[in-house]
Image: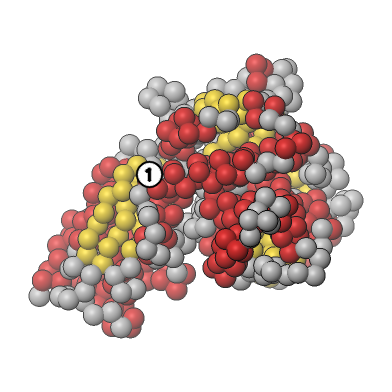
Amino acid sequence: DEQRAALLVVASLFPVPDGAHFSYGTAGFRAEGSTMAPAVCRAGIVAALRSVKLGGAAVGMVITASHNPVYDNGVKIVDADGGMMSRAWEPFSDALANAPTPDALLQLVLQFAKDEGITLGEGHSAQVLLARDTRPTGEYLLDVATKGINAIVGSVALDMGILTTPQLHWMVRNKNRGLKSSQLDYFTQITESFRHLLELTPDDKGSDKLIEKLIVDGANGIGGLKLEEIKPKLASLDIVVRNSGKEGEGILNERCGADFVQKEKVHPAGFGPNDVGVRCASFDGDADRLVYFRIASPSSTMIDLVDGDKILSLFVLFIREQLDIVNEKDNKVLPTRFGVVQTAYANGASTEFLKNLGLEVVFTSTGVKYLHEKALEYDIGIYFEANGHGTVLFSDEFVSRLESLTSKFSSKAAGSTRHEAALRLLATTQLINQAVGDALSGMLLVEAILQHKGWSLQNWSDLYTDLPSKQLKVKVKDRTCIVTTDAERKVFQPSGLQELIDREVGNYSQGRCFVRPSGTEDVVRVYAEASTAEAANSLAKSVAQVVE
Ligand code: 16G
Ligand code: ZN
């Protein structure tokens, strides 16, 4: 029939070459852009099936390889709630991407549809929203994705254009909630809620801080371009965008961007001695990661890094403060289950800082899909990876209680401290992307909070002092030999390895170390922390030797 024929045709258009193998990995399929067509086409089929399964709800697909080099590309599926594709569908996505023949592909789809209770053919609808970043292979791969989507009869592919990854997540979420979901709506929402937050800045904080310049490293990607677009609406901020993604400024992610800055701890290309002391922010190539930094001295490329852990800490302080004001002492009008989610990469000093605030800190494996899922369990769930991926999730109940509270304040109570705190929280729920971590909206929340507190980057950075840390990669024959447990903080297999690591760690004051197989590269990663940089380096080195 028509459905079978369509699948056979599209599968034969983009065959998997001999020896190629695709894996959905931590954040979708990723490889050199020119080799991605088979995986992208088949991901299109998966996305369309997912939409059919969810009764025609919008599903998303982003063509991006994030912080990876410009010649790479990748594809990620966005679920109907705006989050990452359900993990239960990953094995099928893997199998489909590697199906060796058109007939094998057809059989896989038919069997999976049967298992999932999906009726194929006439009479259903499916819609997939597509976006891509600025990579040269993006346009071609978007076309390939469309062909994959169209191979499921009744599906509609909607090209949303060149977007940041979080913009597409936001659009899918809003669309399925019956909310406005265009790019203009996104821009309006974040710029308006940012303006509201600034209007609610306490009077005694003055406005001089606003004038202080902020320099943003756009990684020569899409985030810088979008920031330039909304800059006129952020008139209260003095923003300079470097590595903005405009023609001729530089190559995507090359010696710039959040991943480079956080891993190398040096300033990005395009920055230099003239910027010493200035507050700087850095996005990654698809603008779902955010870190801050400051160049410490004119004679060195080194930076003071303000990473995802410190962004998390700043958000926690602000939100808790507003929540306490609204709830007063014994007047718990807002639900207060507050959860903080980190990974093993969180600097030990940040975890201690958060625990000392009396907060519940939980750990998950590396990767947004794990952190996000955990954060959803709370009324307010805040998650961040040290590398700058993260956001704040507010439960629907929390938001609706907040909405009714802010509208209930009588004219007498309006303008009161409690009323203002409630309005600040409401603006925060609007500003911070509820679908996924978002460098643009995250940066605006940071800026609003610094303004609220009257804080410089230094004040913020002084919340706690990071423990020195060191990361190494180790090449091994088969990285899957290493199996971890306890949110990747302990090695489970091979047996005996954890004892060897423990013995090394025991030699260092404030020592901590873990190893894990990368989810994106064929290496084992080693992370070590200790009281001095030399000690962290030497701990990482000795554990790397043990792993080899
Ligand atoms: C991906 C993940 C990121 C994680 C990184 C770890 C998303 C959107 N991205 O980039 O969160 O930190 O992988 O890489 O989930 P690794 O497994 O190679 O260390
Ligand atoms: Zn990214």
Horizontally, residue 534 falls left or right of residue 405, namely: right
Horizontally, residue 319 falls left or right of residue 510, namely: left
Please name whichever residue, 340 or 508, is drawn nearer the observer in this view of the structure.
Answer: 340
* Quarter of the picture holding the C terminus: bottom right
Q: Tell me what residue is drawn at x 47 percent, y 69 percent.
A: 87
Task: Check disc 1 and report the residue beneath it.
Answer: 184
Please name whichever residue, 434 or 71, is drawn nearer the observer in this view of the structure.
Answer: 434
Query: Mark 1: which secondary structure?
Result: helix
Neighbour class for label 1 at 10 Å: few (<14), some, many (≥20)?
Answer: few
Q: Position of residue 92 (x, y in %)?
A: 37, 71
Which residue occupies the extreme left position in the image? 1
Whether residue 94 is situated above or below residue 108 in the rendered picture: above
Q: Position of residue 12 (x, y in %)?
A: 18, 60
* Quarter of the figure with residue 476: bottom right
Q: Tell me what residue is drawn at x 24 percent, y 57 percent.
A: 157
Whether residue 188 is situated above or below residue 105 in the rendered picture: above
Q: Position of residue 513 (x, y in %)?
A: 76, 55
